[in-house]
Image (cartoon, coloured by chain):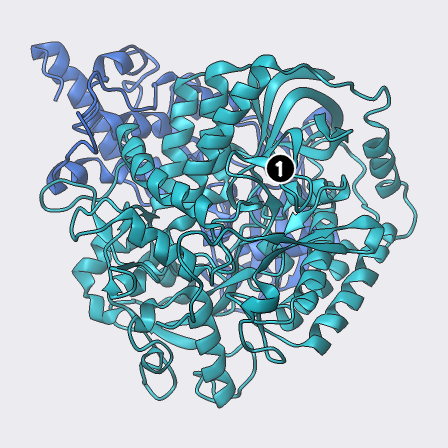
Chain colours: A blue, B cyan
Amino acid sequence: MEITLKIKRFIAKKGKESFYQEYRLEADPNDRLLDALVFVQTHLDGSLGFRKSCAHGVCGSDAMIVNGTERLACKTLIKDLVGAAASAESRTITVEPLQNLPVMKDLIVDQTRFFENFRAVKPFFISDTLPAKGERTQSIEERAKYDDATKCILCAACYSSCPVIRGKNPDFIGPAAIVNAARFIFDGRDTGFKDRLPALDDPNGVWPCENHFNCTKVCPREIKVTKNINMSKKAITDFKENGSTL
Amino acid sequence: MKYVYDAIIVGAGGAGLYAALEASAGAKTAVLSKLHPLRSHTGAAQGGIGAALGNLEEDKPEWHAFDTIKGGDYLADQNAVKILVEGAVEAVYHLENMGLPFSRTADGKIDQRRFGGHTRNFGEAPVMRACYAADRTGHMILQTLYQQCIKNGVHFFDEYIVMEVLIENGKCNGLVVLELATGELHTFQAKAVLFATGGFGRMYKTTSNAYANTGDGPALLARAGVPLMDMEFFQFHPTGIYGMGILITEAVRGEGGILLNRNGERFMEEYAPTLVDLAPRDMVSRAILTEIRKGNGIRGDKKIDDFVYLDASRIGREAIGKKIPDIAGFCATYLGIDIAEKPIPVQPTAHYAMGGIPTDTQGRVLRDASGAVYEGLYAAGECACVSVHGANRLGTNSLVDLIVFGKRSGREMAGFVKDAGFGPMPVSAEDGAREKLGRLADGKKGRPAWELGESMRETMMEKVGVNRTEEGMREALSILRTLREEFGEVRIAEKQGEFNTELSGVLELENLLDLACLTAASAERRTESRGAHMREDFPERNDGEWLYHSLIWLDGGKYRMDRKSVDISIFKPKPRTY
């Protein structure tokens, strides 16, 4: 079927306004949106810029805003976006770059701040002990406690969707950073809660979250993002009240 | 700009990151990656990392070695395999100690599962050797290693593309690099450079590989006069999603999934009586194509792109949710099916390069068949060929390879740079790259790159795929040579430097074309069948004439070849049946 991609174009260095460019192409309903973007770039307009790699939703390269919602282009099928109706409008897909991050070119955003926030929570294993030999043991139940948070691919869809970052506090470290801290907070083997506390228990740390749930809705890995943020808030509160560090 | 480092690592997947951890401990190190490190293809690996921990069943590194060597159809260097399997146990423990969230057994140890070709007691029966984290083992490894790099302050240059490697008088002196964000060229001077750029499945039409897997390391080195090894051995994973190439991990079969033809028959019983669906990948892919040829594919039309069914329903919904949740997700997203109820349509898919940049067991790149090495030049991971995988790789052995040899080469680099000096950098180092960029953007009417790419991918899939013939390979080489020449006519429309992904795509195409030519040329030369290289005109393995690695040089299009001996010191080559 014929579809139209309406893509937001922009080059930071040129200093001009952004604009929308339309491309018409044939697409199979089972094609990924990414397939359509690749077709545009290779056959119609080499100047279109976007990131891609794995093409099946595990690397996080191609997060973008599709018909107003954050999605991974490679996990979004054309048939999920266009209606069966004949109207050109129902077959038009609007594609825009993620929000809350500076746009460098077209659908490519500058991820520097996003990754700085990630680094700020010390997202690495901290433990003051090593097992005598072999692996540390961890029960199946213990392992399940933080499983959700291990799925994050740092695609920035959640960060883009957050209305707090957009409207109130652009310095809020954002959902992904907190999820990646939670991954360690709730991992029984990790003992670094206090090391991460300064970044989390901060006016720009976990506290700005207002439970809008946008992040949870858009996470392509279906992580319960807001829940992880709330669990982290509780862990901090518990610690401050009675010193327990899980 | 000009940058100077003691050690530079190109590629930030599992091998590159582990090498960086080792190298940066002792030397001023930088990692260059054309992607953000977390986008590397290691993150797509699903099934597990193989190590003889023996947490559930008795297991020994010796058995792991035998399986690997036999799995490689006796082309693996056995001394290197010994290092691999012994290093595997230590590597897995180390990963866990770094926080990797492995799935666990009932008594809290690292859980292990069955996997293709892995057996107890030298082939007696499948053994649980694959240490796993749901079906996201690669994701966990990539994340854990990147986290550790952050912890250790490793220096990254994200979205920098290497265009040229500077080698003079057998010594590597540095790199010419394109910064994707700005389109500017930079030179990086170094005492030692390691390539860990991954695989090159994008030579083929149907592949599990990411768009980024374009063999940049091997191609650049080949153009700089370095030989590549065993290029004819490219693995086709038997179970990629029909028409899409998305990988369905072998772990599905490890957990009990079975392959069925259009008659509902579990056909692997005929081809591999002992291991059945857990036979090594090259054998399963061939079996699938044989069934398709007989008319037993699901469509039944005998065409090469027909498919079979992978039935995961007998695993049970609960176990699917625990052990292979991402697979269930892929099938729901892309096929709209619930794998607890419906079978998955699958077909052989270009997956893994056993061949690549030849190295010794310290990661040093070889100059020729004698074992002489370049100074300050290293390779590790899928782009390297040690060789531990021989003619066919067993599942879970790639993740081990990355860790063990990533670590070894990183350590070797750190030791080397202590006493090494910098080599000379040519005054006009960037000229070659600048000229190429200028030509590509000169505005002349050109060939569309996508046409060449499409032709290459189809030619490779049909003629240098699972089943090969003399005629097919000769035709392929002829077509590919022409395409390589025609690349000179390719031009890009986008002249802006900033994030010019049209340009990066074209540079990648050039690399793929060179590697495709080398693959076809090597394949045509080897007149036997071994592991993943299967020829209808020479269907038997011929140790007498062909128990050698093949080396190939680009040599201005002459594709000069040589043979290198294989270390077979531990297990004597035997017929490969399962």
Residue lying at 60% horizontally and 65% vertically, measured from the top left: B546
Q: Is residue B260 above or below residue B116?
A: below
Farthest residue toward the right?
Answer: B444
Left or right: where A63 falls relative to B316? right
User: Observer-nearest residue: B32 or B129?
Assistant: B129
Residue lying at 62% horizontally and 37% vertically, measured from the top left: B365
Residue lying at 24% horizontally and 59% vertically, measured from the top left: B121
Left or right: where B290 falls relative to B439? left
Residue A69 is at least partly visible in this image: no
Quadrant position of residue B94? top left
Left or right: where B481 falls relative to B75? right
Q: Subunit of mark 1?
A: B
Percent of width and height locating residue B144:
36, 32
Q: Is residue A134 above or below residue A207?
A: below
Percent of width and height locating residue A107:
60, 39
Tell me the SS state at disc 1. Answer: strand
The residue that label 1 is drawn on is: B365
User: Observer-nearest residue: B418 or B548?
Assistant: B548
Residue B189 is at least partly visible in this image: yes
Left or right: where B533 falls relative to B287? right
Percent of width and height locating residue B256:
24, 67
Q: Which quarter shows the C terminus of chain B?
A: bottom left
User: Observer-nearest residue: B381 or A77?
Assistant: B381
Kind of residue indicated by mark 1: Val
Q: Which quarter shows the N terminus of chain B?
A: top right
Residue lying at 26% horizontally and 47% vertically, measured from the top left: B52
Mark 1, other Cα within 10 Å: few <14 / some 14–19 / many ≥20: many
Quadrant position of residue B437? top right
Quadrant position of residue B219? top right
User: Observer-nearest residue: B15 or B431?
Assistant: B15
Q: Is residue B196 above or below residue B574?
A: above
